[in-house]
């Protein structure tokens, strides 16, 4: 046996010995079967000593005349149903061996050995299943290849640019491909929508929202908080709404009264701003934890509360960045020297890419202690005050260092300390919770010891 002909969905393919033919749902296969019951890598045909051999891959199944087959030598025409006896049908046929062409009898037209059926596409790269040649092969009169027709070009284009197959591919259901499309097109959409905007805060707000989901993914991968269910989604939406309202009504007004003192290097004013902003981010997390505990008897893992805390921090940072990025744009527009313009551009990039992240890691630390406080009510207020104070002090030192030292390096050091602290808690949250549970100082009930005793309690989000 030599050349192999395969027909599926009205299209023919030809393959030469030595080539591995892959069949499945993925667009990377040679024969793409878009039926959802078919595996992504369902089966393959390989050339061996006995000829072409069909075999299933993994747990995939194939049926011949209703009988389950896993491996079979293709010695004659066979039709295989994929996934189930009623599944998509693939028609496989080996060609006859090549040999000396016999002289045709008088008055009879002898067939040319090795010719593929007219429906099968064969091409200059034999065995690859790509390319094309005229269905009738060489012209009998001239011995030369006949000129390709329009249908041949259309077939070749459809093979090389299989748009219909792409559109039907189940791979579009994967979020990563859709995310790539969104993130590739959004900057262009921003230019189209906002290039004539008269509000200087628009670019910063748009790009802050653009970057925030990437940080959400990063925090999720760092924390592994567990399964995201409806209750966690509802809490997250509530936190976002709360922060947006509280920032405009309370936090912003308090900060405006302290701004001049902070700019003059007053450490107490910076500490007041730190507590003001960290409480704004921690308060909705704490209220959500209490509401879940009181009305639904649900306790979440401390890592889930850390994740929800980062959502609160990112929301705060995105909303706050509008003023900072507006200032950076003005600095660029009014710069009379390249260094000033560079500083403005760098400040814009800093606010867009990092400001929300900074708020998120401080809020994540606070939320860790809030989660602990809910699980250990005996030391509830001490735990909350300790966690919020850590974030508030780091926040205050971050703001104060820039005005007091007139140097970026102390500020970078404080940022590094904040980041290391947050990452430490992402790695040891469960260990710390276990040690607190065993310490008589805290006593009280924990998420582990009482999750089964609470009426209507749900499974925790982490392991």
Image: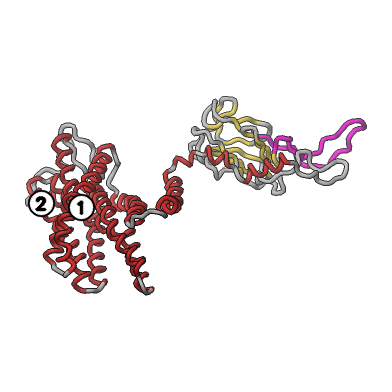
Residue at (53% x, 39% y) in the render? 167
Residue 434 shows in this picture: no
**Which residue in the structure is indicated by mark 1?**
431
Image location of residue 112, percent across then percent down:
81, 38
Image quadrant in which you'd find residue 288:
top left
Answer whether labels 1 and 2 touch (C-beta < 8 Å): no
Regarding mark 2 in the picture, which secondary structure is present there? loop
Does the magenta run of residues contain 365?
Answer: no
Residue 42 position in % (x across, y down): 53, 38
Q: Left or right: where does residue 399 sit relative to residue 318?
A: left
Report the predominant secondary structure element of the magenta stretch: loop
Q: Position of residue 153 (x, y in %)?
A: 70, 43
Name which of mark 1 and mark 2 comes first in the sequence: 1
Nearer to us in this view, 270 or 31: 270
Residue under the point 52% across and 31% down: 83
- Could you tell whether 331 is left or right of 102 in the image? left
Q: Nearer the viewer, residue 24 or 155?
A: 155
Mark linked to residue 439? 2
Q: Residues within 10 Å of mark 1 (few under 14, many from 20)?
A: few
Residue at far right of view: 106
Quarter of the view holding residue 207? bottom left
Circle 2 packing at 10 Å, graded few (<14), some (14-19), many (20+), is few
Answer above or below: position of 340 versus 136: below
Residue under the point 8% across and 50% down: 381
- Which residue range is magenta in the image? 92-120
Q: Give me the residue at 62% from left, 30% from top.
A: 79
Q: Quadrant of residue 31?
A: top right
């Amino acid at each position: 046996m030599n050349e192999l002909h395969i027909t599926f969905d009205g299209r023919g393919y030809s393959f030469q010995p030595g080539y591995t033919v892959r069949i499945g749902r993925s667009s990377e296969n040679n024969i793409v079967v878009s039926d959802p019951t078919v595996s992504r890598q369902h089966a393959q045909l390989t050339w061996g000593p006995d000829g072409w051999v069909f075999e299933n891959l993994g747990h995939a199944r194939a049926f011949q005349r209703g009988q389950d087959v896993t491996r079979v030598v293709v010695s004659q025409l066979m039709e295989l149903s994929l996934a189930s006896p009623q599944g998509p049908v693939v028609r496989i046929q080996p060609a006859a061996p090549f040999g000396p062409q016999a002289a045709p009898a008088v008055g009879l037209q002898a067939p040319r050995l090795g010719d593929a059926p007219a429906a099968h596409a064969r091409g200059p790269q034999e065995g690859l299943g790509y390319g094309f040649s005229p269905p009738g092969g060489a012209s009998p009169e001239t011995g030369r290849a006949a000129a390709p027709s329009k249908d041949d070009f259309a077939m070749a284009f459809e093979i090389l640019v299989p748009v219909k197959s792409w559109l039907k591919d189940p791979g579009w259901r994967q979020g990563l491909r859709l995310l790539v499309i969104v993130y590739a097109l959004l900057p262009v959409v921003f230019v189209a929508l906002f290039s004539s905007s008269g509000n200087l805060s628009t670019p910063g707000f748009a790009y802050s929202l653009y970057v925030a989901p990437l940080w959400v993914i990063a925090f999720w991968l760092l924390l592994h908080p567990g399964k995201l269910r409806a209750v966690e989604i509802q809490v997250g939406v509530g936190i976002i709404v709360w922060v947006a309202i509280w920032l405009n009504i309370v936090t912003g007004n308090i900060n405006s009264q302290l701004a001049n003192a902070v700019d003059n290097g007053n450490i107490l004013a910076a500490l007041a701003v730190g507590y003001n902003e960290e409480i704004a981010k921690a308060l909705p997390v704490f209220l959500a934890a209490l509401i879940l505990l009181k009305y639904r008897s649900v306790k979440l893992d401390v890592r889930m509360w850390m994740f929800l805390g980062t959502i609160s921090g990112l929301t705060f940072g995105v909303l706050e960045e509008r003023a900072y990025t507006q200032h950076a744009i003005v600095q660029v527009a009014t710069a009379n020297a390249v260094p000033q313009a560079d500083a403005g551009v760098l400040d814009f990039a800093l606010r867009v890419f990092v400001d929300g992240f900074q708020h998120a890691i401080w809020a994540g630390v606070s939320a860790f202690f809030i989660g602990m406080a809910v699980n250990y009510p005996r030391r509830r207020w001490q735990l909350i005050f300790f966690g919020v104070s850590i974030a508030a002090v780091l926040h205050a030192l971050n703001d104060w260092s820039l005005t007091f030292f007139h140097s970026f390096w102390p500020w970078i050091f404080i940022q590094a300390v904040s980041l290391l602290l947050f990452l430490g808690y992402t790695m040891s949250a469960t260990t710390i919770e276990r040690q607190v549970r065993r310490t008589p100082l805290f006593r009280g009930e924990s998420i582990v010891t009482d999750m089964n005793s609470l009426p209507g309690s749900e499974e925790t989000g982490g392991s």
